[in-house]
Image (cartoon, coloured by chain):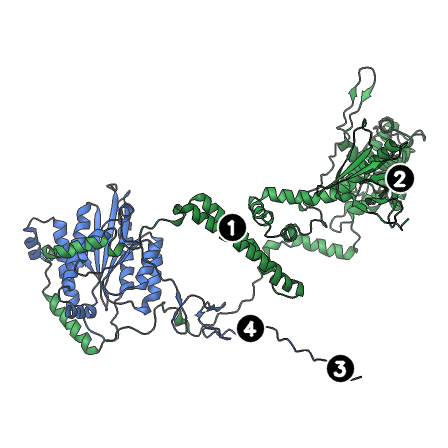
Chain colours: A blue, B green
């Protein structure tokens, strides 16, 4: 088992895109955001119950912002005394009770403050991941002397990928790779190429769940063990990641293309001028063979 | 006889070959035999083809000489002249013995090189076995690209050797040992002899003149050591000494060196002499003259020793900077007249005085690494549409299109739902859902397909892997031959491509096919 001094930090990033979840509630009323959050809480509780030195953080990823559900700011202020007494009545481990109530309260706050704007309907996932990385960094700086920390991020994704966040996403992924932070992904609806890349690069697990109702089971089975234990377990094999680049002109995924040597932009067809940096290219055309003039034989 | 363009070294009549009478001719580059009465040679072998010669034992009645070629064939000559058979054969054998080694080196060199390459590189050796031994490619084609330039140039490692200089103390290293009874033993090794010859070309000249005509080597060196040339107190008495000439040449050389002086414009050696101003301000005395008249015996012997030391050092330095001359080269006429002053050339390259001055001045005052670095001219990158880079590999068109009304509805719905959210952790999921999830995650389940596959190199035994690797490398070599034919400029290449290579590839393919079926049969 891990030594007593090793801190294991799990940051769960939950996609709470209200538009998607609202539509989901209309499509499939058995599995809604409440169920999803219940599952997340079970996962968080299990993680904290494993070892005393395990730490947890939960971030809600919204269209407007990213919000820390746990640890939340209101905890330090000693607010919600009524909630505390009610939860401690059933003899639950204090920490878990506090965590659960904090998460519940925060998510209520977040969703009540939702303002709908038509132009931003995408989940700010890259921002949430960046916040997670910063939190991990902060915690690792606040450790006691001699303590080591191992952290990972679990992303529970609902809505689709946003193409505009590509750059930020890739930066986050590479930063996580440098810090040896695993990024796991549990995808509810549609496959996400960015998260597949993230899991492949950082060494985490990517899973698209066939049954949303059994979310908790998948979380506990696949994502609860940490990276050392995963090597001993038989887990779903890594998915094949599509690393093909997209051409700059049509955004088609191509395997073979033309790359401008000046600005490194990728094209699917050859054009004599690069449209990004306006460099002119010369291509050697095959040599034209001049037909030889046949000498006419003069009649004798 | 037929006109011979080569020099004939030996003719032996009445030599039988394959039961035919004829004459054996040994020429400058080959050995040939022609039957009696005919003009042309039926048998002709260049010496480079001959690997060795064999003779029949002396007691035998038949006197024979056999030539074994590199290819393994052998030709036998029977010396049939009753009286002189043995003598003839001995004469032929002697001549061959002298000639064969000269030509042997050329042929062997190539073979040796090939053998060495094959031994050093096991991959090449395997390739050779696969392609040449099984006759997919001919040996010449195989070696065509690899030997390249072997016959023309020296092998590369030799050219990087540094020349060994001469130790300044080489004469002192010949420590004489007392012989017991008033004699001295000098041990001369070839290194020391070489050093002496390189430093003192005059001695070398004397050596080549006298040895081995009038003096043996031992006598030469004995005289050398006995001569006053060698000893410290070099008093020039006695002209019968062969080395007295050397002494005179040395003297001349030294004088010419001194006269040339050192022409470094930044250093003025002459200003280092004592300057006299007046009585009491310096030494007012005539400079000591170098003439022999007024000196005492001691002074002159000291001067002689110092002169010898200077000369010796100058010679050692000059010999070290001289390029390695071919030993057979005799000293040219110009050098024999001015003795060893040839070496003084190496102290001053013949350049104009002014240029030398400026160059030396610049060298002295400028340092390379203190100069400003020369910046390369760069072209600025000018991007027109840089937002293209930010877009990820996601197609532009979005899959879903939601109306604003849908959005509002959805948000309202979720807000309504979550306004009264209370976690209910005991009712998270039903047991059926959980067990189906577990089933999907167990080995063989829906999510576990395509996982934990054995690596293919664990499934295939290693000997098959090895054979496959060899086949692959051989196929690569054939492909290299194929691609080297492009661009098809000449008709030769075209023919090679369509005819020869086609054949090679077919052979290779059939070989692979055979191997494949053999392996498959073994499995089943």
Q: CA distance from mark 2 to mark 4?
A: 77 Å
Question: What chain does badge 3 belong to?
Answer: A
Question: What chain does badge 1 belong to?
Answer: B
Q: What percent of the width, then of the height, locates residue B94?
A: 83, 35
Circles 2, 4 touching at the beta carbon (< 8 Å): no
Residue annotated with mark 2: B13
Q: What percent of the width, then of the height, locates residue B51?
A: 74, 40
Question: What chain does badge 4 belong to?
Answer: A
Circles 1, 2 touching at the beta carbon (< 8 Å): no
**What residue is shown at x 17% (from left), y 72% (from top)?**
B410
Residue annotated with mark 4: A282
Callout 3: 10 Å neighbours few (<14), some, many (20+)? few
Front residue of this view, candidates B35 and A291: B35
In what element is the residue under mark 3?
A: loop
Q: What percent of the width, then of the height, locates residue A275?
A: 46, 75
Residue annotated with mark 3: A297
Circles 4, 3 touching at the beta carbon (< 8 Å): no
Q: CA distance from mark 4 to mark 3?
A: 43 Å
Left or right: where B432 falls relative to B338:
left
Q: Residue furthest right?
A: B239
**What residue is shown at x 16% (from left), y 64% (from top)?**
A33
Q: CA distance from mark 1 to mark 3?
A: 57 Å
Q: Are marks 4 and 3 on the same chain?
A: yes
Q: What percent of the width, then of the height, locates residue B19?
A: 82, 40
Residue annotated with mark 1: B471
Mark 3 or 2: in front is 2
In what element is the residue under mark 4?
A: loop
Reading the chain from its start, which is encountered first: label 1 or label 2?
Answer: 2
Circles 3, 2 touching at the beta carbon (< 8 Å): no
Q: Is residue A256 visible?
A: yes
Left or right: where B50 falls relative to A74:
right
In what element is the residue under mark 1?
A: helix
């Amino acid at each position: 088992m891990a030594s007593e001094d090793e801190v294991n930090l799990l940051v769960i990033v939950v996609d709470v895109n209200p538009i998607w979840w609202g539509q989901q509630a209309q499509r499939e009323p058995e599995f809604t955001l409440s169920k999803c959050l219940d599952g997340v809480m079970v996962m968080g509780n299990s993680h904290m119950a494993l070892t005393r030195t395990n730490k947890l953080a939960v971030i809600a990823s919204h269209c407007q912002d990213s919000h820390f559900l746990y640890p939340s700011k209101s905890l330090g202020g000693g607010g919600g005394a009524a909630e505390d007494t009610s939860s401690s009545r059933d003899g639950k481990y204090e920490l878990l009770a506090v965590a659960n109530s904090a998460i519940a309260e925060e998510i209520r706050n977040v969703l009540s403050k939702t303002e709908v704007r038509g132009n931003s309907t995408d989940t700010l996932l890259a921002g949430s991941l960046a916040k997670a990385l910063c939190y991990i960094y902060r915690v690792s700086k606040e450790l006691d002397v001699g303590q080591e920390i191992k952290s990972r991020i679990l992303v529970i994704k609902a809505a689709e990928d946003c193409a505009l966040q590509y750059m930020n996403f890739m930066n986050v992924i590479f930063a996580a790779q440098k810090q040896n932070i695993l990024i796991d992904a549990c995808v509810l609806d549609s496959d996400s190429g960015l998260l597949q890349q993230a899991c492949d690069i950082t060494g985490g697990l990517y899973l698209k769940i066939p049954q949303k109702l059994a979310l908790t089971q998948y979380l506990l089975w696949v994502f609860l063990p940490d990276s050392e234990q995963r090597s001993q377990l038989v887990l779903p094999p890594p998915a094949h990641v599509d690393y093909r680049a997209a051409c700059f002109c049509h955004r088609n995924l191509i395997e073979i293309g033309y790359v401008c040597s000046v600005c490194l932009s990728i094209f699917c067809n050859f054009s004599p001028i690069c449209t990004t940096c306006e460099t002119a290219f010369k291509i050697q055309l095959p040599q034209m063979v001049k037909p030889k003039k046949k000498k006419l034989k003069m009649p004798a | 006889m037929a006109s011979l363009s080569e020099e004939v070294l030996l003719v032996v009549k009445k030599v039988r070959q394959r039961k035919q009478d004829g004459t054996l001719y040994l020429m400058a580059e080959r050995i040939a035999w022609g039957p009696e009465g005919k003009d042309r040679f039926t048998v002709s072998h260049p010496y480079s083809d001959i690997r060795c010669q064999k003779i029949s034992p002396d007691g035998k009645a038949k006197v024979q000489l056999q030539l074994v070629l590199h290819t393994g064939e052998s030709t036998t000559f029977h010396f049939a002249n009753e009286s002189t058979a043995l003598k003839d054969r001995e004469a032929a054998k002697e001549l061959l013995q002298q000639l064969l080694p000269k030509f042997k080196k050329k042929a062997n060199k190539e073979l040796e090189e090939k053998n060495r390459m094959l031994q050093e590189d096991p991959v090449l050796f395997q390739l050779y076995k696969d392609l040449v031994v099984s006759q997919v490619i001919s040996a010449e084609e195989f070696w065509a690209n690899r030997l390249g330039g072997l016959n023309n140039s020296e092998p590369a490692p030799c050219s990087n050797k540094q020349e060994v200089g001469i130790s300044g103390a080489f004469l002192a290293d010949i420590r004489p040992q007392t012989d017991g009874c008033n004699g001295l033993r000098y041990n001369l090794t070839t290194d020391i002899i070489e050093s002496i010859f390189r430093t003192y070309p005059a001695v070398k000249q004397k050596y080549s003149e006298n040895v081995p005509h009038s003096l043996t080597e031992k006598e030469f060196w004995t005289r050398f050591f006995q001569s006053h040339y060698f000893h410290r107190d070099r008093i020039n008495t006695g002209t019968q000494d062969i080395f007295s000439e050397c002494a005179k040449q040395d003297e001349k050389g030294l004088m010419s060196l001194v006269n040339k002086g050192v022409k470094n414009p930044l250093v003025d050696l002459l200003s280092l002499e004592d300057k006299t101003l007046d009585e009491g301000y310096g030494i007012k005395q005539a400079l000591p003259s170098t003439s022999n008249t007024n000196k005492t015996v001691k002074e002159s012997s000291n001067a002689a020793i110092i002169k010898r030391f200077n000369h010796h050092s100058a010679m050692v330095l000059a010999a070290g900077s001289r390029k390695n001359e071919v030993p057979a080269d005799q000293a040219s006429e110009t050098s024999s007249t001015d003795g060893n002053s040839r070496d003084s050339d190496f102290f001053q390259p013949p350049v104009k005085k002014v240029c030398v001055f400026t160059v030396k001045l610049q060298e002295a005052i400028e340092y390379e690494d203190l100069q400003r670095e020369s910046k390369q001219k760069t072209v600025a990158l000018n991007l027109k549409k840089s937002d293209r880079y930010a877009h990820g590999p996601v197609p532009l068109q979005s899959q879903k299109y939601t109306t604003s009304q849908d959005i509002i509805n959805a948000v309202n719905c979720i807000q309504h739902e979550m306004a009264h959210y209370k976690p209910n952790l005991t009712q998270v999921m039903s047991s059926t859902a959980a067990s189906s999830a577990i089933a999907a995650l167990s080995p063989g389940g829906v999510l576990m397909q395509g996982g934990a596959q054995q690596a293919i190199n664990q499934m295939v035994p290693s000997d098959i892997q090895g054979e496959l690797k060899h086949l692959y490398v051989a196929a690569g070599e054939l492909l290299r031959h194929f691609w080297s034919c492009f661009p098809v400029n000449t008709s030769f290449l075209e023919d090679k491509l369509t005819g020869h290579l086609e054949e090679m590839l077919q052979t290779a393919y059939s070989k692979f096919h055979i191997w494949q079926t053999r392996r498959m049969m073994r499995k089943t």
